[in-house]
Amino acid sequence: MKRTAIVVGAGLVGLGVAAELMRDGWQVTVLEQGPADGVGTSHGNAGMLVPSHFVPLATMGFLKTGLRMMLKRGAPVTVRWRPDADLLGWVTRFTLSSLAGDEQARTQALLRLSLASRDQWERWADDFSHLARPGGQGLMMIARTAHGLEEEAEVGHQGARLGLHVEILDAEGVRRRQPGLDVQCEGGVWFGNDAHVAPHEWVQAMRSALGSNLVSDTKVLGWQLSGDRWTGVKTNHGAMSADHVVLASGFESARMARSLGVNMAIQPGRGYGYTLPGGARLTTPSLLVEDRVSLTPMGEALRVTSGMEIGATHQAPDPARVAHIRAGAERVFPSLASADWDQPLWTGWRPLSADGLPYIGRVPNLGNAWVATGHGMMGISLAAGTGRILADLMGGHWPSLDPEPFRLDR
Ligand SMILES: Cc1cc2nc3c(=O)[nH]c(=O)nc-3n(C[C@H](O)[C@H](O)[C@H](O)COP(=O)(O)OP(=O)(O)OC[C@H]3O[C@@H](n4cnc5c(N)ncnc54)[C@H](O)[C@@H]3O)c2cc1C
C-alpha cells in the first residue's frame, strides 16, 4: 500500500516536496489556504537560481551593510518595527548568528544545497518538458560605483575559490553580455552557475500536475497529536489524516510549528515587484549591487523586484521603497524609462530564518511530522534540493546531501 502524506502549503517549496515524494511512490495531498490560481510569494519573485548567493544573510557583512542602508529613507533593506516579541527575538538571534563566527560552515552548507538543487532543477525540467528549461545565461551583478564593484569582486573571488564559474568584468564586459543595451555601470561580476525560471509558470504547472490532490481554499488551523505521533490536521473544512505531514507554509510556518513544539526563528522579508510587458531586451538576468534591484527576463516580459522589509506583514506598501525599484532600474538601464511601468504592484514575503539557513527535517519528538521552510531569498533556488532531501529522509534513506546543517533543533 502507498504511504500517504499531507503537505501544508502550495508554494514552490511545498510543491517541490510533494513532487519528490510522488517520484518515490507516495500518495500526497497538498493543502493550500489560498485559491488554486493564487499569486503568492512563489509566483511573482525574481525566479533566479542562485548558487552565487552562497553567503548566508546573517553575517557581519550584511549586518554592516544593512545598518548603513536602514539609515536612508526608502532604502531597499529595512526592519519594520512593531511591538512584537517574535520580531525582537528574531533580530536578537540574527545578530548573534552574524557574530557567531561559523559563517564558513553555513556558507559551505548553503552552497552545497544550492548546487544540488540546481542539478535537481534540471531533473524537474525533464519532468515538466512543456515548460522552458532554466535559462542558462548566468547572473550579472552590476555595480555602478567603484566601491560596489570592489565589494562584489571580493564575493566573486570567494565564489571562484569555492569552485564557481565567475568572471569579473569592466563596463564594456558587462555591456557585451547585454547586447544592444545602454548599461550605466562601473563593471560587474558574472556568475555562470546561476540560471533563471518563470516561477509563476512552475507553480501553476506543479499545482496542475497534482490534480485533485491539491486541495485549495483550505486553511490548516491546528494539529492532532497523540504521544509522539502526529495524527491529523484541523482545517476550516474539517479534519484530515495521513501517515506523515509536512509543514511548508512559508513565513507563516514558525507560528504554526509552535504547537508542534518547534521554536523556529522566522520573520517575513517583504519585497515588491513589477512585471513589465515587452521589457525583455535584457539578455542576462541582473542584480544591481548598490540598489538591490533585480531584473529577470521572463518570456516577452521583464520582471523587476526589490525591497526587503523585515517584519512587514500586511502594512501598506512604503511609497519611497516602491519608487526606488523604478529609479534604481532606470539609473543603470536608462532605456527602461520608456517601459510600461503602469502595472500592478506585486508583493511577496520571504520566509527569513535568523541564521540564513532553511529548516529541513523532522520535528524533534514527533516521528511523522516534518518541516521545509525558512529559505529566505532563495526558496525558488533551493526548492528542488529541499524536496529531494526531505523525500529521502521521510523514506528512511540518508540523503546524498548532508541534512544536518538544516535540522530544526540546530
Ligand atoms: C521580491 C522577491 C524576490 C525574490 N526572488 C527570488 C529569486 O530570484 N530566487 C529565489 O530562489 N527566491 C526568491 N525569492 C524568495 C522566494 O520567493 C521564497 O523563498 C519562496 O517563494 C518561498 O516559498 P515557500 O513555498 O516556502 O513559501 P510560499 O510561497 O509563501 O508558500 C507558502 C504557502 O503556504 C500557504 N499557507 C500558509 N499558511 C497556511 C495554512 N495555515 N494552511 C494552508 N496553507 C497555508 C500560503 O498560502 C502559501 O501559498 C524572492 C522573494 C521576494 C519577495
Image (tube, rainbow, N blue to C red):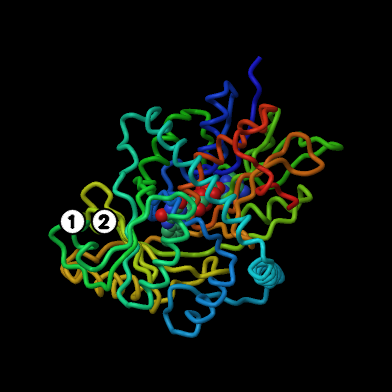
Residue occupied by mark 2:
302
Q: Secondary structure at mark 2?
A: strand
Q: Is residue 40 visible?
A: no
320 or 181: nearer the viewer: 181
Residue 252 place in picture, x, y as percent: 61, 55
Residue 286 place in picture, x, y as percent: 31, 60
- Rendering quarter of residue 82: bottom right
368 or 169: nearer the viewer: 169
- Residue drawn at the location 60% of the way across and 51% of the way down: 358
User: Is 198 situated above or below 91?
Assistant: above
The answer to which of marks 1 and 2 sits earlier in the sequence is 1
Q: Residue furthest right?
A: 227
Describe residue 326's horizontal placement relative to residue 50 as left or right: left
From the viewer's perspective, is the residue at label 1 or at label 2 nearer?
Answer: 1
Mark 1 crowdedness (10 Å alpha carbons): few <14, some 14-19, many ≥20: some
Q: Is residue 96 visible?
A: yes
Q: Mark 2 and mark 1 in contact (Cβ < 8 Å)?
A: yes
Name the kind of residue labelled 2 in the image: Leu
Residue occupied by mark 1:
281
Residue 125 place in picture, x, y as percent: 38, 33
Residue 367 place in picture, x, y as percent: 78, 35
Mark 2 crowdedness (10 Å alpha carbons): few <14, some 14-19, many ≥20: many
Q: Residue furthest left?
A: 180
- Residue drawn at the location 57% of the way across and 23% of the way down: 24
- Rendering quarter of residue 56: bottom right
Instruction: Estimate the spatial distance between the alpha carbons at disc 1 and disc 2, rounded to whole Å.
Output: 8 Å
43 or 290: nearer the viewer: 290
